[in-house]
Image (tube, rainbow, N blue to C red):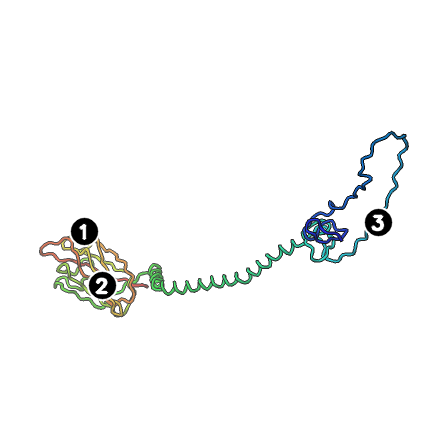
């Protein structure tokens, strides 16, 4: 055995590289030392030329390489004793595969463990968010569904079972506002007057069609005053009253007012503005029609 000149680790005679630090051992073989006689300087002198003698070959004793059991080098295939860090023939790192494989195994464990937990937490968060969103947005979702049904349904007329007014005249009673004839009208005294319509069952009110003036004929339209603004008061089956302003153009002919209110049982129109006001004129409301979802 011989020590490594760098780290001092004992190496076999046939090892070309140190198993601990990988130092090449071929450069460190001891060279023959000169004797004291050879070291003495000899003065040259004349000699007779002669045929040079052929040096006799010397035989070096073969060193039997011991049988080594151990894992082969991944580079050259040489067997190496256990515990070596470098191959004894080519100095290839013997721990490289283990150093590379260890992080891969740890990474695989993380992907199977914490990754599954993270996915579970994400899915749980999504479910909780959907539940909260459904609870918070439920009223808006219901309104959206109703709005879609309103747009995809065909409007069907519905007639009130009763109508009353704050005031009218014998020639223009409240019933003329729902008789289906456009040249008959309810004659209201002016701003603040109201007309009520009641129904025998709750329904979804899609729209109203309102015709103002004494007639749909342009020459007769402005013979009386015309309501141009109303307060629309809608009462539902549970007693809730919702109020919305309605503005109309001062022109002859029917005008549609979109609503979209469910469970309606009563509707009131309160006059807030009148066009063509003159002494002796009435606020003429020619016709009011109601439409429900078919």
Give the mark nearer the N terminus: 2 vs 3.
3
- SS at badge 3: loop
Residues at marks 2 and 3, CA–CA distance in whole angstroms? 123 Å
Question: From this viewpoint, which residue is outermost toward the left?
Answer: 279
Mark 3: few, some, or many residues within 10 Å (few <14, many ≥20)? few
| Circle on res. 233 | 2
Between residue 174 and residue 93, name the one nearer to us.
Answer: 93
Residue at (42% x, 64% y) in the render: 128
Q: Quadrant of residue 196?
A: bottom left
Q: Earlier in the sequence, mark 1 or mark 2?
A: 1
Residue that carries the numbered disc 1 in the rendered image: 218
- Classed neighbour count for the residue bearing mark 1: other residues with Cα under 10 Å, few (<14), some (14–19), many (≥20): few
Above or below residue 219? Residue 178 is below
- The number of discs equals 3
**Residue 223 location in percent, x, y?**
14, 53
Residues 284 and 29: in front is: 29
Mark 1 vs mark 2: in front = 2
Q: Is residue 147 left or right of residue 166?
A: right
The residues bearing labels 3 and 1 have C-alpha atoms spaced at a distance of 136 Å
Mark 3 vs mark 1: which is more N-terminal?
Answer: 3
- Where disc 2 sits, the SS reads strand
Q: Which mark is residue 61?
A: 3
Circle 1: element type:
helix
| Separation of residues labelled 1 and 2 (CA atoms) | 30 Å
Q: Of tags 3 and 1, which is closer to the observer?
A: 3
Q: Considering the image in quadrants, where does the C terminus appear?
A: bottom left
Residue in the picture at 78% in, 56% down:
67
- Give x and y (percent) for residue 189: 12, 60
Figure quadrant of residue 255: bottom left
């Amino acid at each position: 055995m011989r020590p490594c000149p760098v780290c001092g680790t004992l190496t076999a005679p046939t090892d070309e590289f140190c198993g601990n630090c990988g130092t090449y051992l071929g450069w460190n073989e001891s060279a023959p030392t000169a004797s004291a006689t050879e070291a003495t300087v000899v003065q040259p002198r004349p000699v007779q030329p002669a045929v040079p003698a052929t040096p006799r070959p010397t035989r070096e004793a073969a060193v039997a390489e011991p049988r080594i059991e151990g894992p082969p080098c991944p580079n050259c295939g040489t067997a190496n004793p256990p515990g070596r860090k470098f191959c004894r023939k080519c100095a290839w790192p013997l721990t490289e595969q283990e150093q590379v494989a260890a992080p891969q195994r740890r990474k695989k464990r993380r992907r199977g463990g914490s990754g599954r937990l993270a996915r579970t937490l994400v899915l749980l968060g999504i479910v909780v968010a959907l539940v909260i969103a459904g609870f918070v947005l439920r009223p808006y979702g219901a309104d959206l569904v109703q709005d879609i049904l309103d747009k995809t349904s065909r409007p069907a007329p519905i007639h009130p079972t009763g109508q009353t007014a704050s005031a009218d005249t014998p020639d223009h009673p409240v019933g003329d506002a729902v008789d289906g004839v456009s040249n008959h009208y309810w004659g209201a005294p002016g701003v603040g007057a109201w007309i009520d319509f009641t129904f025998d069952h709750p329904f979804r009110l899609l729209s109203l069609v309102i015709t103002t003036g004494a007639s749909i004929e342009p020459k007769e339209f402005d013979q009386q005053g015309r309501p141009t603004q109303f307060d629309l008061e809608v009462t539902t089956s549970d007693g809730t009253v919702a109020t919305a302003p309605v503005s109309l153009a001062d022109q002859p002919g029917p005008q549609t007012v979109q609503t979209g209110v469910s469970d309606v049982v009563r509707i009131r129109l309160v006059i807030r503005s009148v066009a063509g006001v003159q002494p002796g004129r009435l606020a003429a409301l020619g016709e009011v029609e109601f439409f429900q979802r078919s």
